[in-house]
Amino acid sequence: MNFRQKTIFITGASRGIGKAIGLRLAREGANIVVTGKTAEPHPKLPGTIYTAAEEMEAAGGKALPIVMDVRSEEAVQRAVDAAVATFGGIDVLINNASAIMLTPTLKTPMKRFDLMHQINTRGTFMAAQKCLPHLFRAENPHILTLSPPLGLKQHWFGRHLPYTLAKYGMTLCVYGMADEFREQGVGVNALWPRTTIATAAVNNLLGGEDLMRRSRKPEIMADAAFSILSRDSRQCTGNFFIDEEVLREEGITDFSSYAVEPGQELVTDLFLD
């Protein structure tokens, strides 16, 4: 797929993996719709949708920053409408927005439970629902969702049931939509990292600086996403990809450049045994 002037709609693109994917595709000349809630600088989190958009334009693409709460149907519809009005259509949807809280049943406030399900499962479903009418008209339409493989190991549910339910909800959207929209030629796939990725969530919520040093950079996910989205959507659908495996298929065997601190023992990500 030639990404020049193709339009990529990304949920949660102001930082982390979403931003890395946007930058990777911007270097190919794509139009990036940078959505997220961060319009003003956050005291603990780097960047806004506007600074991310500036970086993507500097990388060679065009960018449209849009403040969007993925929980709001009206906000998602407005963002999709603005993307189409600006760029003429949508070729790819990246479902990246996600909320995380690794707590067991008795220690999860219902407000947080609702937040994870509204952003993760419902947000993924709704973004796809609003983008699909435009994807049907695209030359090589893809939906790529950042969610784990469909492996229902009981211990992942027992450790942090609320988050696991919300994250597997995203995966089940992939599972169902790949079949539902196969005839229309929409490639619907999931992508998950082999190791933890150095993002704000890892630093602030999971393991701090120690885990960051034992993680890979978001660029490995961006390169894997680029590979998947370059494929024929009619031949590539219903897959649950792992970043490292995708890049091995591309002939890459040395992943040291992706390590935050080469030589450190890497930590396997959640939902992978």
Image: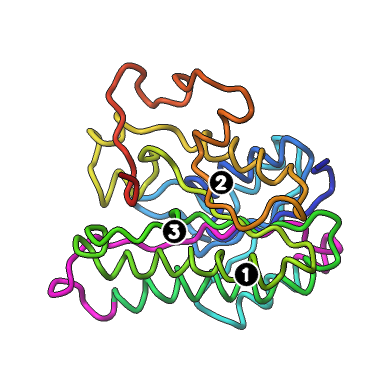
Q: Quadrant of the C terminus?
A: top left
Q: Is residue 254 above or below residue 33?
A: above
Please tell me in which quadrant of the rendered image residue 56 appears.
top right
Q: Amino acid at mark 1?
A: Met
List the residue tagged with mark 1.
177
Q: Position of residue 199 (x, y in %)?
A: 39, 43
Q: How many marks?
A: 3
Please tell me in which quadrant of the rendered image residue 26 appears.
top right
Q: Position of residue 61 (x, y in %)?
A: 76, 42
Q: Which of disc 3 and disc 2 is earlier in sequence? A: 2
Bounds of the magenta span?
83-111
**Is residue 168 inside the magenta stretch?**
no
- 10 Å neighbourhood of mark 2: few (<14), some, or many (≥20)? many
**Is residue 108 inside the magenta stretch?**
yes
Give the secondary structure at mark 2: helix
Name the residue located 55 percent from the left edge and 65 percent from the top edge. Answer: 175
